[in-house]
Image (spheres, rainbow, N blue to C red):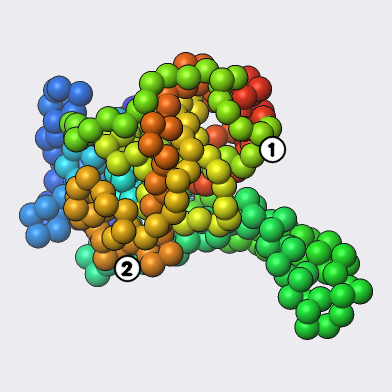
Amino acid sequence: MDEANTKAAVLRDFLDLLEWQIPENTQLEYSVEAFGRTYKVDYALILEGTPVAFLEAKGADTALTVKHEEQLSSYMMNKNVTYGILTNGKQYRFFQRRVDASNVDVQKVGDVALEDLPNRLAVLTAFEKDAIESGESGKILGRINELREARRTLEVEKDELAVELSNTLAEEVSDSISSLAETQAKEMIDRLVADIASEIDADSGGTDEPVGGSSGGVEPTGNHIAGAIRRTEIDGNDDAKVAVFPTKESGLPFLKENNAWGFVRIGSEFEYVAMYVTGDVRQVKYFATVKDVVPPEEAELSRPIEEYADGAKIAEDKMVIRFESESLFELEDPVPYESKYPQGLRYTTIGALRSAETTDDML
């Protein structure tokens, strides 16, 4: 079926399922400015006269692509719409616009085939009219996002957490069990990661990929980039620890004007920071030396915190990483993406960063 037939035969029933009805709270062909032109979103889901979600439809004879995802992302960013659905009637992709630290971007929070929709009730429920209207949608997707973050933390810090657990058991029971306890702790963390991954997949289809975003024309108030440097020129021992953070291009003004990065949770100490720029760039492109890690209110940021993020939503354990003066560099030979990229905080070493041919060599 082409797009028109897909809309008529499938998608109106899908909207009815989520309690969105035409014309009461659903507007067809909603006008949106993007890429310097005016486009029409297939369905805008409206509450109190304001669009809260967009549904973009393709024909069942059309495979969904990254270009389609970026198109929907641009529509959502332009109108500050929080929720989005991209579908061809056979595959349903669910999106959430998120304001996180210095980034505003759109995350793909679910990717579900039609036949699997009944088994993905959490993400489906999050897009119901009543759930969006009551705020329950944010709680549902927030829990899924928290599980994802917990999984990443467990994966990244498995060795350190296993040592902490084994030390606790050794102190409480006996030093003689320390090595056994560490091995068992690692196995337990692996099982926990697998269980969390299964629960995420059961809720949403298991994806939270960044797919779009925009700087919104924000220009940095200053530029602390000290210049360009080749990776082989970076000082430091090969085994020195580097924290690798992802950022949309929209996050670069924060980096440049503050000579810092935030607001992030820190799992362990590290000496350096590298920044992987997502979107069309897909490179580890910036590098800096860590000065200290401080709470946001002590970071002396260039703008009020609320211009970067909703301060009330910044968790107490999220911090700002400040860099040494004249230590933030753009890499002349950035590390290109191959198949792995940091969806959250990842760690590597100076040696791996220096020698990496692609991101797969350092992550």
Q: Position of residue 239 (x, y in %)?
A: 69, 38
Q: Are marks 1 and 2 in contact (CB under 8 Å)?
A: no
For the residues marked 1 and 2, what is the alpha-carbon distance in whole angstroms? 45 Å
Look at the numbered disc 2 and give the secondary structure of its residue. helix
Residue reaching furthest to the front? 325
Q: Position of residue 7 (x, y in %)?
A: 29, 38
Q: How many marks?
A: 2
Q: Tag 2: residue type? A: Glu
Looking at the figure, which quarter contains the N terminus? top left
Residue reaching furthest to the left? 49
Q: Quadrant of residue 132?
A: bottom left
Q: Which residue is mark 2?
A: 136
Residue 329 left/right relative to 214:
right
Res 142 seen here? no
Label drawn at residue 239: 1
- Crowd class of label 1 (few under 14; some 14 to 19; many from 20; radius 10 Å): few
Q: Residue 27 or 171: which is nearer the viewer?
A: 171
Q: Tag 1: residue type? A: Asp
Residue reaching furthest to the bottom? 172
Residue 129 sits above or below residue 111 on the image: below
- Crowd class of label 2 (few under 14; some 14 to 19; many from 20; radius 10 Å): some
Q: Position of residue 126 (x, y in %)?
A: 36, 60
Q: Quadrant of residue 10?
A: top left
Q: Position of residue 42 (x, y in %)?
A: 22, 37
Q: Name the residue rendered at 14%, 30% in the picture.
A: 33
Q: Residue 355 or 20: which is nearer the viewer?
A: 355
Looking at the figure, which quarter contains the C terminus? top right
Q: Disc 1 vs disc 2: which is toward the camera? A: 1
Residue 359 sits above or below residue 183 on the image: above
Q: Name the residue rendered at 43%, 64% in the picture.
A: 317
Residue 160 left/right relative to 248:
right
Q: Earlier in the sequence, mark 1 or mark 2?
A: 2
